[in-house]
Image (tube, rainbow, N blue to C red):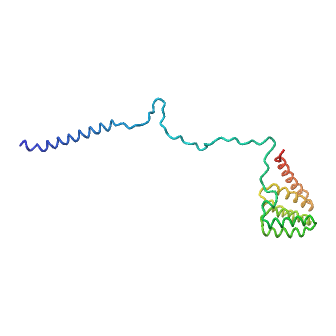
Amino acid sequence: MNKNTFEPRGATVAALCAVVLALAGCASTSGQRRVWSPPESQGSVRPTPSPRPLEAGPIVEQPQPQPGVQPLPDFPRSAEEVSGSAVTALMRQARSALDAGQPAQAASALERALRIEPRNYFVWSLLAKTHLTQGNYAQADSVAGKSNALARGNVYVELENWRTIAAARQAQGDAAGAEDASSRAQELERWLAERAPQ
């Protein structure tokens, strides 16, 4: 064979070898390349933001109640605290009428108040007392019970209602029912007395 026939192949092989060697040199260089990272030896720690625990926050000591003194419930104690001006005025009229010995006028004023605020348990409670004054004992019992249902745990109103219920049941000859209502009223009285300031 002619020697010149292999020269292009030899040049190609030589060029390829040069490329491979160059790439190998790059690979070895890149293999030795170091990326800086903070030292982790000798007790040093990589700086990372410390996560805040879910319950983080200053520990605040809650004031402890004094022995024997518990807080009074935060319920409204009068109609004026929850009623509009029209109902408040009608409640005043009803009380004045009761004081004057005119329960029919008081009942009329309270029924008007209930048309304005049908869920006002103070109005229902005073209406129950008005029925008791009129001698409508069954109605007094029923209306006081409705007031309790609407009061949703307002102990001030419930106390007055249980007293009304006890009197209404006693007047009807229901001694057991009257005793039960009186017991409930006494429980509420004790409960409130335990929370009264000493």
Residue 149 percent location from the top left of the image: 79, 60
Most foreground residue, 48 or 145: 48
What residue is at 86 percent from the left and 57 percent from the top?
A: 160
Does residue 38 appear in the picture of this structure? Answer: yes
What residue is at 49 percent from the left and 30 percent from the top?
A: 43
Q: On the picture, is 196 further left or further right than 34?
A: right
Most foreground residue, 198 or 195: 198
Does residue 1 appear in the picture of this structure? Answer: no
What residue is at 40 percent from the left and 37 percent from the top?
A: 36
Quadrant where the N terminus sits is top left
Quadrant where the C terminus sits is top right
Residue 51 percent location from the top left of the image: 54, 42
Query: Where 139 sits versus 19, above or below?
Result: below
Residue 141 picture quarter: bottom right
Q: On the picture, is 94 further left or further right than 14?
A: right
Residue 60 percent location from the top left of the image: 67, 41
Residue 7 percent location from the top left of the image: 11, 43
Query: Where 81 sits versus 15, above or below?
Result: below
